[in-house]
């Protein structure tokens, strides 16, 4: 196989000398997200215990840290209410739902359906031992709350 050789592309020494004589261009810095000014950063409340759990195929959510902080045990009666992606669970002697022996909280199908919770969906659990209350938030509700209260995330996020 014979053919013509292609000359390598090498910049001439004159071109290299011309570049060295110029001053270097100022480098641009990347923009950084700036959080809104706060008088002081918010503190995490010590009277709330948080956990993250997934709804299992039977509608149960389990986080031993959260239920342990509440002191709930198997056989406790619970009252559950739900609206717009939020389930509120209270220990109530006349409640219609019984806590199983394992540290999990059953969410009835009607309430899961009302909140749009499907098996495998993650929920943020918030326990308030002083109020003997557990609240389960769908992550869609958490996302909406974050977007409403921290607007710079929505602006800087790329989804405009």
Image (cartoon, grey):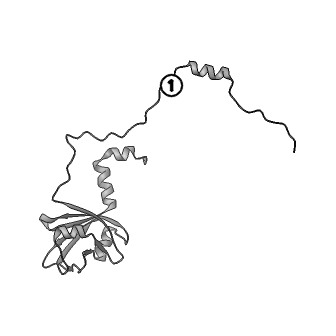
Q: Quadrant of residue 113?
A: bottom left
Quadrant where the N terminus sits is: top right
On screen, residue 71 versus residue 22, left or right, reads left
Which residue is drawn at the image coordinates 87% and 42% (left, top)? 2
Residue located beneath label 1 in the image: 25
Q: Mark yes or no: residue 109 visible.
A: yes
On screen, residue 137 versus residue 2, left or right, reads left
Position above or below: 147 against 116: above
Q: Nearer the viewer, residue 47 or 123?
A: 47
Q: Quadrant of residue 78?
A: bottom left
On screen, residue 31 versus residue 103, left or right, reads right
Q: Position of residue 20 (x, y in %)?
A: 58, 21
Q: Quadrant of residue 7?
A: top right
Q: Nearer the viewer, residue 60 or 79?
A: 60
Give the structural element (helix, strand or loop) at label 1. Answer: loop
Position above or below: 22 against 59: above
């Amino acid at each position: 196989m014979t053919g013509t050789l292609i000359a390598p592309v090498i910049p001439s020494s004159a071109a290299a000398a011309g570049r060295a004589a110029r001053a270097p261009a100022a480098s641009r810095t990347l923009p950084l997200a700036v959080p809104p000014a706060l008088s002081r950063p918010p503190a995490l409340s010590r009277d709330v215990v948080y956990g993250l759990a997934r709804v299992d195929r039977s509608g149960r959510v389990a986080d031993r840290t959260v239920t342990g902080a509440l002191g709930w045990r198997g056989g406790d009666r619970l009252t559950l209410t739900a609206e717009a992606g939020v389930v509120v669970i209270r220990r109530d002697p006349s409640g219609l739902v019984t806590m199983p022996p394992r540290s999990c909280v059953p969410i009835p199908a009607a309430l899961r359906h009302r909140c749009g919770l499907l098996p495998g969906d993650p929920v943020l659990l918030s326990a308030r031992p002083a109020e003997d209350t557990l609240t389960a938030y769908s992550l869609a509700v958490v996302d909406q709350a974050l977007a409403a209260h921290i607007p710079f995330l929505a602006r800087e996020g790329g989804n405009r």
